[in-house]
Image (spheres, rainbow, N blue to C red):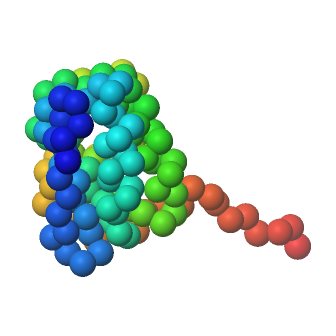
Amino acid sequence: MTCHTARFEAAAPLPSTTVVTAHGELDAVNAQPLADFALQRANHALVLDLSEVEFFGTAGFSALHTLNVRSGADIDWVLVPSTAVSRLLRICDPDGALPQSETVDAAVTALHGAPRPSLLQLVAEPG
C-alpha cells in the first residue's frame, strides 16, 4: 500500500506473527494510516519494522502511541526503529515505554520468547 510519501507492506513469517514494514517518510498525512494498516493485519504478535523510514515526524510518535493503546492485551508488538525514529523516540519516549528491538529477527524472538508484561497488577485482598 502506498500512502503519500511512504509504502507499507505486510508479511507473516510465522502463523501468529505479522511483520509490517514501512519505507519512506512518516508524517501527519500517513502516520495514522500506518497504525491502522498494522492493526488490521496483526494477528497475536506484530513486528512494526520502521528500519527503512527516512523521516519520522511527531505524528509518527502519536501513531505509535495509538497503536500501543489499541493493541491492548490482544496483540503483543515490537518496534524496529530507524535512526530517524530512534532520534524522535529519545525525545518523546525517554523512558522506553514502547517495546523496541534492533532487528526484525530479534523482535520475532522477543515476541515468542518472553511474555508481555501486564498493564494491571493484581493485589490480594486484605485478609
In the depicted view, which residue is nearer to us: 89 or 95?
89
Please indicate, yes or no, whether residue 83 appears anywhere in the rendered image.
no
* Quadrant of the image occupied by residue 3: top left
Task: Classify residue 66 as left or right of residue 26.
Answer: right
Q: In this view, does 65 lie above or below 123?
A: above
Residue 63 position, x and y percent, is: 40, 37
Task: Classify residue 54 as left or right of residue 39.
Answer: left
Residue 116 position, x and y percent, is: 43, 63
Residue 98 position, x and y percent, is: 39, 43
Residue lying farthest to the right in this orientation = 127
Count all numbered tags in the image, as a single digit: 0
Please indicate, yes or no, whether residue 26 appears anywhere in the rendered image.
yes
Rendered residue at 38%/31% (across/down): 61
Residue 36 position, x and y percent, is: 39, 48
Rendered-image quadrant of the C terminus: bottom right
In the depicted view, which residue is nearer to us: 20 or 45?
20
Q: In this view, does 126 lie above or below 119?
A: below
Residue lying farthest to the bottom in this orientation = 15
Q: Is residue 8 above or below residue 124?
A: above
* Quadrant of the image occupied by residue 55: top left
Rendered residue at 39%/37% (across/down): 32
Rendered residue at 35%/24% (across/down): 28
